[in-house]
Image (spheres, rainbow, N blue to C red):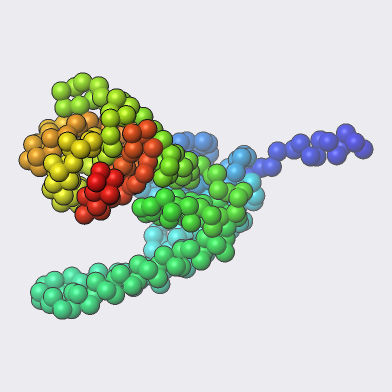
Amino acid sequence: MVIIVFTACNQKEKFTVTGEIEGVKGEVYLAKVVGRNVENIDTTKIEGGKFVFKGSVEEPDQYVILFKENPPARVSLFLENSVINIKGDLKNPQEAPKITGSATQDVVDKYMEAMKPFQERDVAIRKEGAALNQTKDEEGLKELRKKFDDLQEEVKVAVKNFIRSNNKSVVAAIIVASQRLNTIEDIKAHVELLDPSVRKHKSLENFNKVLDNGKNVEIGKVAPDFTLKDMDDNEISLSSYLGKGYVLVDFWASWCGPCRKENPVIVKAYNEFKDKGFEIIGVSLDRSNATGWKKAVKDDGLTWPQVIDWTDNKAIAAEKYAILTIPANFLLDKEGKIIAKGLRGEELKEKLSELLK
């Protein structure tokens, strides 16, 4: 009796996917979605108008079924250990195949249905905008932009409500990961909508890394050190500038319009306080565009040390500082502690006036 129970408890859960898709023949592939690519997992043949895949998965995940003799055709689904049936007709591409038996796929379908009215309104607004552009109706376009902005806010609320209502599903985690979130606070708020059981889902790896790194650049923390190459290909470390005065670590890029607009303000502050114990290290996110970076430094009159954050195809400093958008900056004291961040416009001058009076 004990042996029977032990065996039953250790049987691995399995899935069976049965498909009936009209208009296809030959070989069928089951592939896992990995980032922007797919990884073939299994192959079978259509027999008697049907195909079957059997196996097991560790957790529900995104998969796709591909047809060798109908390369554009595909069926996307969330695969889990259950009995899943797919019915469809490739001759009727307007109607998506019907997928039943996957609770995770049911959540996806529910989400798509919830978003459908917003998508229809978005299409209508864009169509109206195209017409107004033709007639150059500026007042109409202004009103339409407000309508579009209001729609975006409605979508944000609807998405949050959906995540909250389905917070134990991996689909909710994937929806969170797909949002364009520009602040650590916003990322944290969205992740906290999820049940703890899915907060570490692989789709949230980047967001969780940002949250972890964000804890290291809070006010009062010692700023992470970095070593990057300057305009003459010499290595410069942040730590080598500490202990002499206040240091501003300024993340920017030549292609960043708001950064370039901010540069004259920073130049003015630098010229006023550089002889009073103030230094700046400019950290460019121009990646491999060294020419554009150097030209912008010259054109904008940036005379302080400049480094470029691109090593082995990674922006190492930006990752350490949990940079999501630029411009972004961190003001450090002599010990390297962060005493202010995100100083824009006259805020930098006002803070330096307070510290170096």
Relative to 186, 296 lies left or right: left
Front residue of this view, candidates 206 and 105: 206
Residue at the (35%, 67%) spot, across then down: 152
Vertical comparison of 117 with 329: above or below:
below
Q: Measuring 35% from the left and 71% from the top, which residue is drawn there?
A: 151
Q: Is residue 241 above or below residue 143?
A: above
Is residue 172 at all visible to an observer of this figure? Answer: yes
In the depicted view, which residue is nearer to us: 147 or 341? 341
Residue farthest to the front, as pictured = 357
The x, y position of residue 342, in whole percent, is 31, 49
Above-or-below relation of 301 to 188: above
Quadrant of res 216: top left
- Of all residues shown, which one is farthest toward the left? 299
Q: Residue at x 20, y 48 (%)?
A: 259
239 relative to 66 in the view: left or right: left
Residue 352 position in % (x across, y down) = 25, 46
